[in-house]
Image (cartoon, helix red, strand yellow):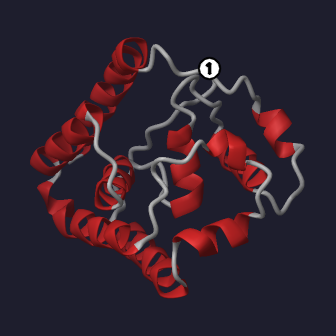
Amino acid sequence: MKTRKKIINWLFEKSQVFYTKNFKKNKTPWNLTVKQLCGYPKTTFGYKLGLFLKQNGFELLPKVERHDAYHVLTGFGTKVEDEIALQYLCYGNGKRSKYLFGVLFLGTVLLPEYFQYYKKAYTLGKQSNTFHHFDFKLLLLLHYQNFKDTIFSKKTQQELSCLQKENNLQTSNTFNYGTSKE
C-alpha cells in the first residue's frame, strides 16, 4: 500500500503543475501568505486557513488556493486517502472537473481498500449545502463556525468528524500530500 500511495503522491505533484498551467490560466492568485492569514481575527475562516497551512508547513498554491479552503471547511487531512476522500465529498457536493474525475478514478483503482471511506465522504457531500463554487477569498473574514454551520448540518459535521477519526484509527501507513515549503 505504501508504494501505491507514493505513486498517487507523485501523480498529484506532477499533475498539479500541468493542471494549474493549462486549466487555471484565467484564475487570479490570492497573493496571500500564511503570515497574513494568521493575522486575521482568530474566529475567521481566513485565520483557520492560515493555521491549517502553518500546522502542516504549507504555503498556498497560486490559483488553486480553494483546495486548502476545502480542507479547512471539511476537516479532511492531507494523507493520500484523505485527499481522495475530500474529492469524493466535493463530487457528492456537485463539483465536476477533469482533474477531480482523474483523482476519483486513480484513487479508487489504486486504493480500493478505502472505497467505503470514499463512499461515505461522497454521501456526506450530497447531504451538504453546495460550497464547491464559492470564491473563498471573499469569505476569509467570515466567522468560521457560522460559515461551517451554513454548509453542514450539526449531524453532518458529527458524521464527518467520526468518519475521519475512524479512518485515522484504521491507517497506520500514512503518506501525506501537501504544498510544503521547501
Q: Is residue 152 above or below residue 132?
A: below
The residue singled out by tag 1 in the image is: 182
Residue 125 appears in view: yes
What is the crowding at mark 1: few (fewer than 14 residues within 10 Å), some, or many (at least 20)?
few
Q: Quadrant of residue 149?
A: bottom right
Question: Between residues 40 and 6, which one lies in front from this camera angle?
Answer: 40
In this rendering, position of residue 167 left or right of residue 150: left
Residue 118, x across and y down, in percent? 25, 62
Residue ID at (60%, 20%): 28
Q: Which amino acid type corresponds to the residue marked 1 in the rendered image?
A: Glu
Quadrant assignment, res 93: bottom left
Residue beneath the point at 58% across and 22% down: 62
Above or below for 30 versus 158: above
Per the image, label 1 sits on a secondary structure element best described as loop
Q: Quarter of the image containing the C terminus?
A: top right
Q: Position of residue 2 (x, y in %)?
A: 25, 44
Q: Does 181 sit left or right of 164 as displayed?
A: right
- Please indicate, yes or no, whether residue 3 appears anywhere in the rendered image: no
Q: Quadrant of residue 59?
A: top right
Q: From what the image shows, is residue 93 above or below residue 66?
A: below
